[in-house]
Image (tube, rainbow, N blue to C red):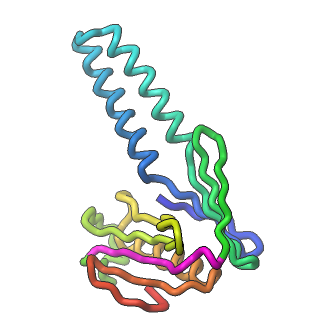
Amino acid sequence: MVKAISQESGSFELEIRGGLWEGIHAVLFYLAVAFAIMATIGVARLATGIACVVFLFYSIFAIVSSPTYVTIKPSSREVLVERYYYFIPWRRTLQRSDLERISVVESSQPPSEKEKKGSKRDLSYYVKVYLELKQRGRLKLFRSGMTGAPYDNREKAFLITESTASALDLPVTYTMRGKEKESGET
């Protein structure tokens, strides 16, 4: 999930959630729930009860204390990436020379204009926006969530793609489930 935080003096900041780190700790959270169920039915009550409390508080703390912020600065044409693990910051600055392009990946069935007015939920639809790096892979800028309507997610991805591409003067690659076309817009 991505959330725009501020837009002062042309720069803007995105909060990025999800990924491997939060996925692992979400599994630990559900493991804590399983231990709670086991403790209530009497399976090694003391051990599963203690494990439930430990995993529950650890997973919540790890997820809450570990956001990722991406600040895009058009004036200096650089991207500041701040990742926090247990409130400990890890910062990296990417110059324009480190960036290759913006990649948009969308499912094969994009939402239609009819869905704009309705709040239709389609879990098969997804859109992802990545900042491709020349040497070290890619950085996720946006991923559609399960709670938003497909048209709203597509609109958010478009706004993030356009503002990032114009701020950093990067080309945009649009991929629709294996079909790739290069364009300046999504």
> Is 166 placed left or right of 74 in the picture?
left
> Is 61 placed left or right of 87 in the picture?
left
Please tell me whether residue 58 is drawn above or below residue 135 in the rendered image.
above
> Is 126 placed left or right of 54 in the picture?
left
Task: Please tell me which residue is depicted at 45% across the width and 22% down the height of the picture.
Answer: 54
Task: Please tell me which residue is depicted at 61% across the width and 46% down the height of the picture.
Answer: 84
| Residue 163 falls inside the magenta stretch | no
Question: Looking at this rendering, what residue extends furthest in the bottom direction?
Answer: 183
Q: How far from the left and from the top, in percent, is residue 19?
A: 43, 53
Task: Please tell me which residue is depicted at 25% across the width and 66% down the height of the picture.
Answer: 124
Q: Quadrant of the C terminus?
A: bottom left
Question: Looking at this rendering, what residue extends furthest in the front direction?
Answer: 135
Please tell me whether residue 136 is drawn above or below residue 46 in the rendered image.
below
Q: How far from the left and from the top, in percent, is residue 81?
A: 63, 60
> Is 139 placed left or right of 109 in the picture?
right
Q: How far from the left and from the top, in percent, is residue 164?
A: 58, 77
Which is the main secondary structure of the residues drawn in magenta? strand
Q: Quadrant of residue 129?
A: bottom left
Please tell me whether residue 65 is drawn above or below residue 163 in the rendered image.
above
Task: Please tell me which residue is depicted at 59% across the width and 64% down the height of the picture.
Answer: 4
Please tell me whether residue 139 is drawn above or below residue 60 in the rendered image.
below
Q: How far from the left and from the top, in percent, is residue 169?
A: 61, 86
Foreground residue among 179 and 107: 179
Q: Quadrant of residue 74?
A: bottom right
Say how many tags the image has.
Answer: 0
Task: Give the residues drawn in magenta, as a range.
Answer: 96-107
